[in-house]
Image: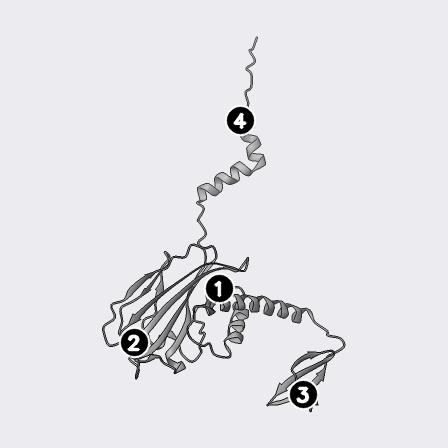
Amino acid sequence: MAKQNSLIPFTGKLGNLIGYQRNGKYFLRSMPEVVRQTAATRRAARRFGVASRKGALIRNTFYDDLDIHCDSGHINRLNKMLIAAAGNNAAMKGFRFNQYAGTDRFFTVAPRLFRDGTLYIPPQTIVLHKNITSLEVKVIAACIDFGTGYVTGTDTFTLTIDPGKPFQGTKIPLDITGKGTLIITLQVRGMQQDGPSGNRQYLAADIIAVQEPQIPKVSKKHTYLQQVISGPEIALNCLNMYTYQPMTQRE
């Protein structure tokens, strides 16, 4: 480890040297000549690569519609969660783009996603917060095909809630027809008289629902008929049963 004394320090790779920063100071170290990887480290690297690409796809899908600043560690938190999930997309539910506030700060009863794509926010008493005169609620829905890496459909819906009045609940129909996994992010901003609050504790955006594509059910009768039709031996027997056999007369 060597300390950088140049007027313009750098970070990153330069030839066989790597510059990095630690505690406000810049240092240099040389790259190893040989990097040895075990089978376990290669598997870990593959899992990290898959999770990081998936995380980037999720983040970039919602960034354009989010109106809040994500916390500085949200990328690492999302990647860590995806690695632990091991392909289970349902584990994304509950992820916070801003770790300092969640939608449960405003809603005591969590919204529910119906199978028809309708988001239902049940009737409840909205939590009051100091200097917050209204809540701006924004639903961001996206259908992502993780197999191809494409976003196949998006939809947004925004409403305003007065926390001083009884909330009777609402149903929000979402027009998503694309192929893939449906992910719903709920954003809530505490609004003051002059605009959204600058306090990050009143700015929330959580993934509240994940719905996998519906696979049509195949009846047992249909499966049995497929096996009968596709089975070569049974098909041959059926053919023999219906083959015309001429009758032989006895003398």
Residue 248 drawn at (x, y percent): 56, 13
Q: Which residue type does callout 3 highlight? A: Phe
Q: Which residue is mark 4?
A: 241
Hey, what amino acid is under mark 2?
Ser
> Residue 27's mark?
3
46 relative to 131, above or below: above
Disc 4 to disc 1, C-alpha distance: 51 Å
In the rendered structure, are the residues bearing label 4 and label 1 in contact, judged by CB atoms less than 8 Å apart? no
Q: Position of residue 42 (x, y in %)?
A: 66, 69
Image quarter where the N terminus lies is bottom right
- Which residue position holds label 2? 134
The residue that label 1 is drawn on is: 89
Disc 3 element: strand
The residue that appears at 62% across and 70% down in the rendered structure is 44
Please state the horizontal and vertical placement of residue 177, each as a whole percent of the image. 42, 54
Mark in the foreground, 1 or 2: 2
Q: Is residue 5 above or below residue 54?
A: below
Name which residue type carries label 1: Asn
Calculate the distance from the C-alpha at mark 4 to the C-alpha at mark 3: 85 Å
Nearer the observer, disc 4 or disc 1? 1
Q: Secondary structure at mark 4?
A: helix
Which of disc 2 and disc 4 is earlier in sequence?
A: 2
Front residue of 119/7: it is: 7
Please name the residue shown 55% across and 34% down the image: 234
The answer to which quarter of the image holds residue 67 is bottom left
Q: Are marks 4 and 3 in contact (CB under 8 Å)?
A: no
Q: Is residue 172 left or right of residue 97?
A: left
